[in-house]
Image: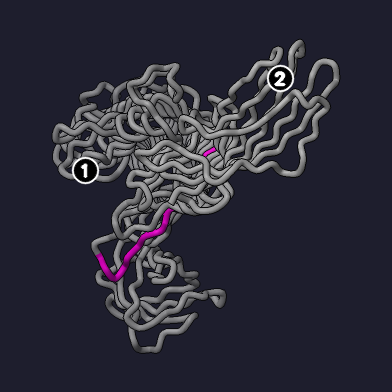
């Protein structure tokens, strides 16, 4: 059944000046008590001086798009313009099969604090389609108002085709949501001017949510495009000594009162893993005051001891996806400092760690800070994304040591893969790894089209002196085009992986398989077993042992042709400064008449500034030379800091030479 708010007995004016909230709420009550239906808003501007509240299952609010405007104009204070919520003594009751479509909600000035223009609380099987929420675009008088938001574990819902513009906190905010999809939505010009909350203006945000997706959504002109966070808890308490706590039961006294629905989600600090761990609560009973008796499932393995800290309403995000869409030109200027991110993944609670995050096919462009910044997350995948013209491409970082010494939460950013991405022309660096572990970057282009940007392809650093080194990094199949001199020489880059402070930051474990410009010896830190190809010469190298920038074994191939009985010098290998090397050389020669030869040589060389390189001992012949013509000859020398081959042909003959050199290098 359809309930037209302009028809009798409701008679809403819709003229923008007469308050219509009483008429609208009357229509909603009639619709809800009749078992549900559609409350219809014909085109018009409906002035709201108080909340429109849907507390019934089966009620759908429907208008005519931007022609049906609900205008928030409180006489005093402020309120949530449209709220789906049924309160109860325990906190709330779920309402089902509800939704809103083709409506516009406008704020004339300030909005409700930390709530949405359209708020869906405790809803099940719901939708929000083609709804527009508009603020004034200048901070809404320092208020903290979302556009479209969920709370109280709303689940099994979809938000599609919506536009949020000019509000002061996240445009679309999934708080405490389950199995919710946001698809084809736009958030723009989200700015917060409230003190200490200037960075709260995200386009899209999720906290305490699980199994949620943002598909083909676009954010522009916000402080942050997408904000994926582990929210802080709503309070804490201490495990009581009596009755004695066990693996399956304990008593806890909270620091403040809480409703029962928050007691279903508890966490406890685990000093071994440096995390707050979720507890499998099966029941929570208020025994007196702020004291609760807690029962846990038999599967619990977390030790519960008297005095341990318990966190209330603790639930870090899980299984969040950003698929497609864009995050562009998100800029925040505060205290003369310009920042702004495409995506931020973080935690507001020390020890809370998000998990199972996928960012796929997203375009991040023109964000002054990072295209994607991730911290306090595990098991994350960034694939098929384009990150260009940001302050930085992707930053993966651990968190700084918290101020609370009893909870030293660190080492919480782990197991992340970057695959198939285009990362180019960012101002500072392509990828930064700060005190993270188990990171794979593969099948990705980290490049530049001009020489004045992205001076560091991959930058390695630590969060602080007490933080761990970045470890277990796998790099393979990465295109570093644009780092030779073809783009100019303003920022000449000698290595694709740059530790900020040399040995103290360099990666010691993992495996690199890279191709870049120039030889790696004395330049590239890499874990043992790593492989490298010099794109300028085609020479290949491998790291036999150690992780410092020395001890690369070179595998070099040279081709040369001699005409007649000429002597030809071939530069095989430049001896690095302050090093000792051993070179094994095999030369294969063949004449066009079928004559052939094979030569094997070995020699040592050393170089120590300011002296030039010199041979160590004599050149050794390995085995015996195999040659069809004794007029040919092959030998090696050390001259001008270079190991050289000396080849001699034969009069009247054209000879092709293939020279293979293996070099072991030791740089103390």
Instruction: Please determine whether, in this image, residue 604 is positioned above or below residue 93.
Output: above
Side of 138 where 213 appears, left or right: right
Side of 162 where 191 appears, left or right: left
| Magenta-span inclusion, residue 417 | yes
Instruction: Name the residue nearer the viewer: 376 or 608.
Output: 608
Q: Quadrant of residue 274?
A: bottom left
Q: Residues within 10 Å of mark 2 (few under 14, many from 20)?
A: many
Instruction: Please determine whether, in this image, residue 409 is positioned above or below residue 631.
Output: below
Side of 3 where 240 appears, left or right: left
Q: Secondary structure at mark 2?
A: loop
Question: In percent of the image, x 37 and y 21: which residue is there?
Answer: 451
Instruction: Name the residue nearer the viewer: 336 or 32.
Output: 336
Q: Position of residue 96 (x, y in %)?
A: 50, 48
| Magenta-span inclusion, residue 332 | no
Q: Secondary structure at mark 1?
A: loop
Question: In percent of the image, x 44 and y 35: which residue is there?
Answer: 495
Question: In percent of the image, x 39 and y 71: which residue is there?
Answer: 271
Give whichever of discs 2 and 1 has the lower sequence position: 1
Where does the magenta region start and end? Answer: 404-419
Side of 347 where 495 appears, left or right: right
Q: Quadrant of residue 496?
A: top left
Tag of residue 197: 1
Q: Position of residue 167 (x, y in %)?
A: 27, 32
Q: Residues within 10 Å of mark 1 (few under 14, many from 20)?
A: some
Instruction: Name the residue nearer the viewer: 448 or 363.
Output: 448
Residue, far top: 652
Dominant secondary structure (helix, strand or loop) of the stretch shown in magenta: loop
Residue labelled with disc 2: 649
């Amino acid at each position: 059944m359809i309930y037209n708010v302009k028809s009798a007995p409701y008679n809403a004016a819709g003229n923008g000046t007469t308050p219509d909230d009483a008429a609208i709420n009357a229509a909603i009550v009639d619709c809800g008590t009749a078992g549900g239906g559609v409350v219809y808003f014909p085109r018009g501007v409906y002035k709201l001086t108080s909340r429109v509240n849907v507390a019934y299952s089966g009620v759908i609010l429907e208008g005519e798009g931007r022609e049906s405007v609900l205008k928030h104009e409180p006489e005093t204070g402020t309120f949530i313009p449209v709220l789906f919520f049924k309160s109860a003594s325990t906190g709330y009751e779920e309402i089902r099969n509800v939704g809103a479509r083709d409506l516009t909600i406008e704020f004339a000035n300030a909005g409700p604090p930390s709530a949405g223009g359209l708020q869906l609380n405790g809803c099940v099987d719901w939708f929000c389609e083609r709804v527009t929420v508009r603020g004034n675009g200048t901070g809404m008088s320092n208020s903290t108002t979302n556009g479209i938001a969920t709370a109280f574990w709303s689940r099994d819902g979809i938000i599609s085709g919506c536009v949020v513009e000019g509000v002061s906190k996240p445009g679309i905010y999934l708080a405490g949501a389950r199995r919710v999809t946001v698809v084809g939505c736009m958030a723009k010009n989200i700015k917060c001017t409230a003190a200490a909350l200037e960075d709260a203006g995200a386009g899209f945000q999720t906290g305490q949510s699980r199994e949620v997706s943002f598909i083909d959504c676009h954010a522009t002109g916000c402080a942050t495009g997408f904000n994926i966070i582990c929210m802080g808890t709503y309070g804490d308490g201490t495990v009581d000594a009596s009755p004695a706590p066990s693996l399956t039961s304990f008593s806890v006294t909270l620091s403040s009162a809480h409703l029962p629905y928050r007691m279903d989600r508890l966490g406890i600090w685990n000093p071994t893993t440096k995390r707050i761990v979720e507890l499998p609560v099966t029941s929570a009973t208020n025994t007196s005051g702020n004291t609760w008796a807690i029962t846990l499932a038999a599967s619990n393995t977390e030790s519960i001891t008297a005095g341990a800290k318990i966190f209330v309403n603790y639930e870090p995000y899980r299984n969040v996806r950003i698929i497609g869409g864009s995050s562009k030109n998100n800029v925040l200027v505060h205290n003369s400092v310009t920042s702004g991110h495409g995506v931020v993944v973080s935690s507001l609670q020390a020890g809370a760690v998000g998990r199972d995050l996928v960012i796929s096919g997203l375009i991040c462009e023109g964000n002054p800070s990072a295209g994607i910044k991730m911290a306090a997350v595990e098991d994350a995948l960034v694939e098929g994304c384009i990150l260009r013209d940001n302050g930085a491409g992707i930053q993966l970082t651990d968190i700084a040591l918290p101020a609370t010494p009893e909870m030293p939460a660190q080492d919480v950013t782990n197991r992340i893969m970057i695959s198939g991405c285009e990362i180019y022309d960012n101002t500072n660096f392509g990828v930064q790894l700060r005190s993270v572990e188990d990171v794979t970057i593969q099948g990705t282009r980290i490049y530049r089209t001009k020489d004045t940007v992205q001076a560091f392809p991959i930058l390695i650093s630590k969060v602080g002196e007490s933080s761990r080194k970045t470890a277990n990094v796998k790099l393979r199949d990465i295109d570093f085009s644009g780092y030779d001199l073809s783009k100019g020489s303003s920022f000449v880059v000698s290595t694709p992986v740059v530790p900020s402070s040399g040995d103290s930051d360099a990666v010691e474990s993992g495996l690199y398989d890279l191709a870049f410009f120039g030889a790696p010896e004395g330049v590239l830190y890499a874990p043992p077993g790593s492989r490298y190809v010099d794109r300028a010469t085609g020479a290949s190298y491998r790291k036999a042992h150690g992780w410092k920038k020395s001890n690369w074994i070179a595998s070099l191939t040279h081709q040369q042709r001699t005409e007649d009985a000429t002597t030809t010098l071939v530069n095989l290998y430049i001896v690095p400064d302050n090093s000792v090397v051993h070179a094994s050389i095999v030369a294969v020669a063949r004449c066009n008449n079928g004559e052939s030869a094979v030569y094997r040589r070995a020699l040592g060389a050393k170089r120590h500034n300011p002296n030039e390189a010199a041979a160590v001992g004599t050149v050794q012949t390995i085995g015996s030379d195999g040659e069809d013509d004794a007029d040919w000859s092959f030998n090696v020398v050390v001259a001008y800091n270079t190991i050289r081959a000396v080849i001699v042909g034969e009069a009247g003959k054209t000879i092709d030479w293939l020279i293979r050199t293996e070099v072991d290098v030791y740089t103390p």
